[in-house]
Amino acid sequence: MSATTTTAKKTAQGTVDASFRRHEHAWSNEQYYLVALINFIDKSPSPFHAVYETAKALTSAGFTHLKEEDNWENAVLPGGKYFVTRNQSAIVAFAVGGQYKKGNGFHIVGAHTDSPCLKIKPVSKIEKEGTIQLGVETYGGGLWTTWFDRDLGVAGRVFVRESDTSMTSRLVLVNRPILRVPMLAIHLQDADARKAFSVNAEEHLRPILATAAAAELTGARPVDKSASHHPLLLDLLATELNVSVDQICDFELSLFDTQAGTIGGILDEFVFAARLDNLACTWLATHALLESLSSLESETNVRVAAMFDNEEVGSNSLMGAGSNFLESVMHR
């Protein structure tokens, strides 16, 4: 069993590990890769987190983080291992063969870090029918009926003002059910209405954050009519990041189901998890590259794992597969 697999087994959630133990006699040690995959997915509810976790694994394996704006002329050498990120949501990792000569080729595996989800709108503050709701928009081609009655958290990045002249991007992951898109109770609709139901993304997918009454009773800050977001949301982010609300400049946040992934089926043969499209391939591409390093010295080409963002919306962005990201890395 590899070191990666051993670590994954030790750090896996109890439910996943216990699931494997039920049929441990029937599986080879390699099945523990599934535990590591599920852990990666659970830690990666946004593309930013997926890239962060991928970069962490690469760094642990001795890869050097290169920056696009730097000069690579004397930095990339045969036998070297490197990775580059763009927008914190796309990453290209590559290992240069020990026998590489200028003009040789590339072995490339591609994947993407994004998945269909609900994203918080730039102006999300909504109060209606005595509830504090969150304005969201659909991202990608999701099965939106599956988002009803789920325990939803939020994850992404927040831009924080550190001083009058500096701002940083910080990841945030609120892994608890602070939001819910409720389905109408069965006794409030007849059979024909249930059969004819079709999701209106603008009307039906707005999650509930709190009731207005509870917010008032608990002393929540009054709502600023000119503000883009409800103070409950901003206060939560400030608490999670240990900053003041005034330091929050902007954010890119998406909703995710807080239910952890697991192994299922009576023979423990299925992976039940969100974002399998395409975090499964992101993890596999990364670890295929890592486990190929033992033969890197005899390699004549460059081995590449490229993980892009925005595949779910066409890939035509600065960090998408339609950009110059991979081409630029290969050229340099």
Image (spheres, rainbow, N blue to C red):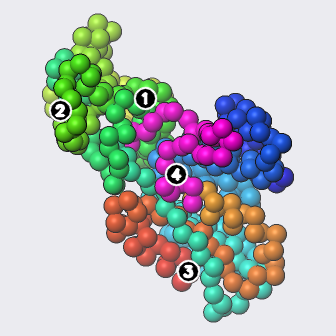
- What residue does disc 1 label? 151
Asked whether 225 or 194 is in front, the reply is 194
Which label sits in the foreground, 2 or 3?
Answer: 2
Q: Residue furthest front?
A: 191
Residue 289 x %, y %: 69, 67
Asked whether 106 or 279 is in front, the reply is 279
- What residue does disc 2 label? 193
Of labels 1 and 3, earlier in sequence is: 1
Distance in Å between CA atoms under marks 2 and 3: 55 Å
Of labels 4 and 2, earlier in sequence is: 2
**Magenta stretch bounds:** 254-281
Please identify the quarter of the rendering in which residue 310 is found: bottom left
Of labels 4 and 1, earlier in sequence is: 1
Residue 78 position (above or below residue 117): below
Q: Which mark is residue 276?
A: 4
Please identify the quarter of the rendering in which residue 188 is found: top left
